């Protein structure tokens, strides 16, 4: 019995768990189904070692080889695509999740900011991210917010005439 904390010391509070009385089959743990779990000590071992032991993630040699093969194939596709793009070509840039933009190719090759092949494009409108320079290194010249760098597979070279949007009059 527990005291309820009343000013009158004569009252006591009695609690009875009726659900436990109704479910008497779980009174003993023998009737409860059990599941086996991993014995893994977070204090003595780490997630990295766990992944190594069970060959998960980057420690799975088969998946790692497939990823490296896919990466090499994509780099080769980018190299071929970059070889077909020349500085001065008119182009359309189609990046997933963005509307198509028209501009002029100003740079083709590798860059210091990220690995792989890149195409520097000067847009006809101020829809870019830079002025032809990234991290202080200049790759080509253009006005601020007119330049960008995209992967060669996102660039379509063709006869895209330059449109006058009347931006010089503003």
Image: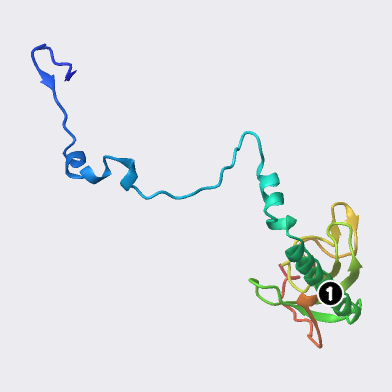
Residue sitting nearer the eye, 43 or 86: 43
Give the percent coordinates (x, y) of residue 131: 82, 61
On the question of residue 147 being in view, the answer is no
In this figure, what is the number of numbered marks? 1
Give the percent coordinates (x, y) of residue 4: 16, 19
Label 1, secondary structure: give it.
helix
- Please name the residue that numbered disc 1 is placed on: 78
Quarter of the figure with residue 84: bottom right
Compared to residue 19, the image places residue 99 above or below, namely below
Locate residue 107 relative to residue 33 in the image: left or right: right
Give the percent coordinates (x, y) of residue 51: 68, 51
Locate residue 8 relative to residue 146 in the image: left or right: left
Residue sitting nearer the eye, 6 or 150: 6
Residue sitting nearer the eye, 162 or 151: 151
Identify the image quadrant of the C terminus. Answer: bottom right
Quarter of the figure with residue 13: top left
Q: Most extreme residue toward the front, as rendered?
A: 30
Locate residue 133 relative to residue 126 in the image: left or right: right
**Residue at the spot 85% in from the left edge and 68% down from the top edge:** 118
Q: Most extreme residue toward the bottom, as rendered?
A: 159
Quarter of the figure with residue 88: bottom right
Mark 1: few, some, or many residues within 10 Å (few <14, many ≥20)?
Answer: some
**Residue at the spot 88% in from the left edge and 75% down from the top edge:** 79
On the question of residue 65 being in view, the answer is yes
Residue sitting nearer the eye, 128 or 55: 55
């Amino acid at each position: 019995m527990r005291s309820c904390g009343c000013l009158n010391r004569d009252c006591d509070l009695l609690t009875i768990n009726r659900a436990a009385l109704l479910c008497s089959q779980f009174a003993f743990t023998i009737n409860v189904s059990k599941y086996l779990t991993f014995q893994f000590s977070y204090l003595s071992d780490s997630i990295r070692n766990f992944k190594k032991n069970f060959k998960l993630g980057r420690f799975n040699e088969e998946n790692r080889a497939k990823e490296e093969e896919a990466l090499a194939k994509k780099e080769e596709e980018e190299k071929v695509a970059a070889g077909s793009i020349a500085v001065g070509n008119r182009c359309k840039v189609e990046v997933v999740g963005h509307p198509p933009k028209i501009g002029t190719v100003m740079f083709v090759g590798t860059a210091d900011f990220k690995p792989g092949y890149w195409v520097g494009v000067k847009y006809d409108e101020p829809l870019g991210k830079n002025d032809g320079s990234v991290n202080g290194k200049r790759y080509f010249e253009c006005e601020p917010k007119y330049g960008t760098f995209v992967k060669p597979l996102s660039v379509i070279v063709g006869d895209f005439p330059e449109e006058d949007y009347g931006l010089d009059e503003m």
